[in-house]
Image: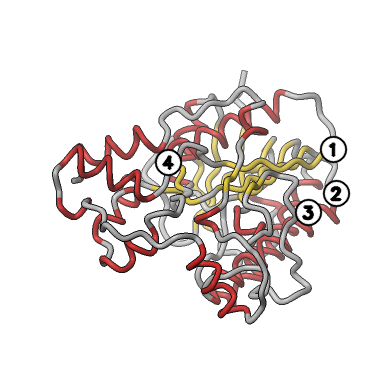
Amino acid sequence: MTSPLLLVTGATGAAGRHVLPALRAAGFRVRAQYVRKAGNDSGIDWRRWDFRESLDFGPLVDDCVGIIHLGAEIANPEFMDRVNVQATAALAKAATAAGVRYFGYASSVVVYGAPHEADVDESTPRLDPRRSISAQYYAEPAVLAYARSKTLTEEALEELAPPMRVEFWRPTVVAEPERLLEARDWSTMRKVLCLYRRTQYIFAPDAAAAIAHLTTRGLARPPGASIEAFNICDEACGRYRDLFRIGFACTGDRRFHAPPLELPYIADLIRNTRHSRRLALRHGLGSLNVSNARLRATGFTLPTGVPAAFKRALAVHA
């Protein structure tokens, strides 16, 4: 019996590099979309496709039972509407025409912006893209544009209501081993500002495992139309102060020695108020308690977890 075929967009990106082997290990055949250079796995059907050049996705989705849509523009706001919003809607329409049963969309935790409540689950309101994003989220302009495009894309998929199972995956900060160690080299001032903040890291292979799990689960369920969101996060990600403590204990590296001074959350509140010119209690990413209870309820557990991944990174890269 032939294994089911999945299309993975953005297959050579930071997430795709881990998702492809996870899907292959789960027994799927993979067709992988890329823009610049194909990967090295000869068992994958590599297809070059640039969303800025064509949105005629018929040849890409042909014969696929599911789509793992990771492709996105994350840096250049000029292309975000085309690559993130229009391309996703066109891909969903092509998937509908081809009879695809499952559509997994890699959204982001940025769709929550800076909410009024620190505890975040999938019922937390999203940003309102018709209002000023900077009034709802404190971030650099490119991140604000990215957050707006991700929110608009979720809305577009809801409006399309395609006759298949659609899932929004909202990861926090997907981190490779080197990313887990980056705070070691921060300036003293940045360490002081960030010690209290939650890292919001999720180890990249753990995020890939969650995507493979949800895809397998979604395709195993009876055919039907539905839309569901899942936060993909690590509730045990810890705060930066925890990473510094573990890093110093494991290595003795003075760069992991945390400064004695730590600014409380009120400093971020003041900064946000100055930026938005509004006196409003909003919680930035570092103070959010993002829940993955819905993901865990499907039977998924993180294979590694940030604490263990951090110690591994210390052993290999520190």
Judging by the rendered image, the residue that carries numbered circle 4 is 203
Q: Nearer the viewer, residue 79 or 309?
A: 309
Check disc 1 and report its element: helix, strand or loop: loop
Q: CA distance from mark 4 to mark 3?
A: 28 Å
Task: Give residue 304's position: percent from left, percent from top.
Answer: 41, 30
Check disc 3 and report its element: helix, strand or loop: helix
Q: Residue at x 61, y 40 (%)?
A: 291
Nearest to N terminus: mark 4 or mark 3: 3
Q: In this rendering, would 301 be left or right of 155?
A: left
Judging by the rendered image, the residue that carries numbered circle 2 is 161
In this view, the mark in front (2 or 4): 4
- The amino acid beneath tag 2 is Ala
Q: CA distance from mark 3 to mark 1?
A: 12 Å
Nearest to N terminus: mark 4 or mark 1: 4
Marks 1 and 2 in Cβ contact (< 8 Å) = yes
Nearest to N terminus: mark 1 or mark 2: 2
Q: CA distance from mark 2 to mark 4?
A: 32 Å
Q: Residue at x 66, y 26 (%)?
A: 297
For residue 225, the mark is 1
Looking at the picture, does residue 44 appear above or below residue 283?
above
